[in-house]
Image (cartoon, helix red, strand yellow):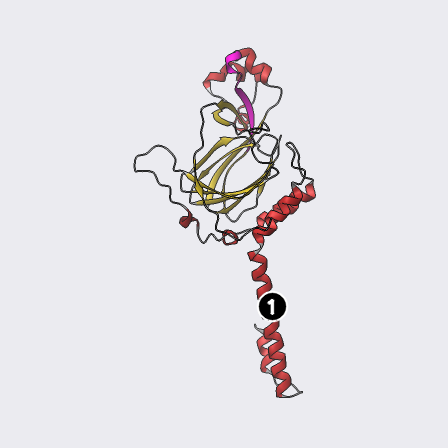
Amino acid sequence: MNIGRILLSKKSVSGHNSSNLSKKRKKKKKKMEFEKRKSSRENMVQKLYDTCKQIFANGKAGYVPPPHDIQRLSSLLDSLEPKDFKFTAPSMEFSSTNPPGTVEAPLATYIKIHECNKFSIGIFCLPPSGVIPLHNHPGMTVFSKLLAGTMHATSYDWVHNHHHQANHYRGHQESRMRLAKVHVDADFTAPCKSSVLFPESGGNMHCFKALTPCILLDVLGPPYSEPEGRHCTYYQHYSYDHISFSDVNKEMKMKEDETRSYAWLEERKDEQFVVLGGTYDGPTIKL
């Protein structure tokens, strides 16, 4: 029921001029409210940059923002939509397709919005079956927000104090193999809540597989840096009950229903994650 329209349709006791004045005021007010909402949406990327600049002002590896800052950035990410970055539809952002019969996953596209020594903001555009392989985030706090599409996410955290067990049974040559606990293993469909991982928890190692065209926003604080020792390491995962680890598994005496929550991760020295470089055409950020 449009109450405003009904009220305007009634004659004012002050006469015709008063009625016209009331109409003009209401029209002006509606226009101002519309412009305010429009301006607010246009500045969402700027708000994201400003918020990250405040929260990651420390800029040091291993720094975890306080809970109220984590909540502030998470709430902002939860409100973001593809149109805030001038994406009209996920299917329009992908140009990477592999020939029929190709085994390799199609390439993802990475669009850098901003990067400095304290934080980075970027977007991954993944075609169906596109994969971001299992990798870590040393000394980093990372916020992720699925803006569009459906993807499967898997993440892990290290199980500490297990090295002596594995190496005792497997030998020194297996020192790159470590036990990890599953943090997340599920499908996500936008719109959904943002996620956050920390240097030692929250699923610091994760991987993604696009089930449909996807747009994934990533905020890293601080970003990867080879000179500062924050290089990206990739892993191959094995199920906990993998036959190669039968001796270790028996010794640890884990219940069968608990084994699904664990996996063995092996560092992959030769792994290379190749992405296409995209151009950011969204709202300009004032630094």
Kind of residue indicated by mark 1: Met
Asked if residue 175 can be seen in this view, the reply is yes
Would residue 90 be found to the left or right of residue 250 on screen?
A: left
Whole-percent x and y of residue 240?
Answer: 51, 23
Binning the other alpha carbons within 10 Å of mark 1 as few (below 14), some (14 to 19) or many (20 upward) gives few
Q: Height in image: 61 above or below 247?
A: below
Point 50% across, 13% down: residue: 173
Q: Height in image: 48 above or below 59?
A: below
Of 97 and 39, which appears nearest the observer? 39
Residue range of the region highlighted in magenta in the rendering: 172-183
Total number of numbered labels? 1
Image quarter hosting the N terminus: bottom right
Does residue 84 belong to the magenta stretch? no
Whole-percent x and y of residue 43?
Answer: 58, 55
Asked if residue 7 can be seen in this view, the reply is no
Q: Height in image: 59 above or below 247?
A: below
Q: Please tell me whether mark 1 sits on a helix, a strand or a loop.
A: helix
Of 213 and 31, which appears nearest the observer? 31
Name which quarter of the figure residue 69 lies in. Answer: top right
Of 165 and 56, which appears nearest the observer? 56
Of 61 and 206, which appears nearest the observer? 61
Residue of label 1: 32
Does residue 176 belong to the magenta stretch? yes
Whole-percent x and y of residue 6?
Answer: 58, 78
Whole-percent x and y of residue 285?
Answer: 57, 50
Point 63% across, 76% down: residue: 25
- Which residue is outermost to the left? 100
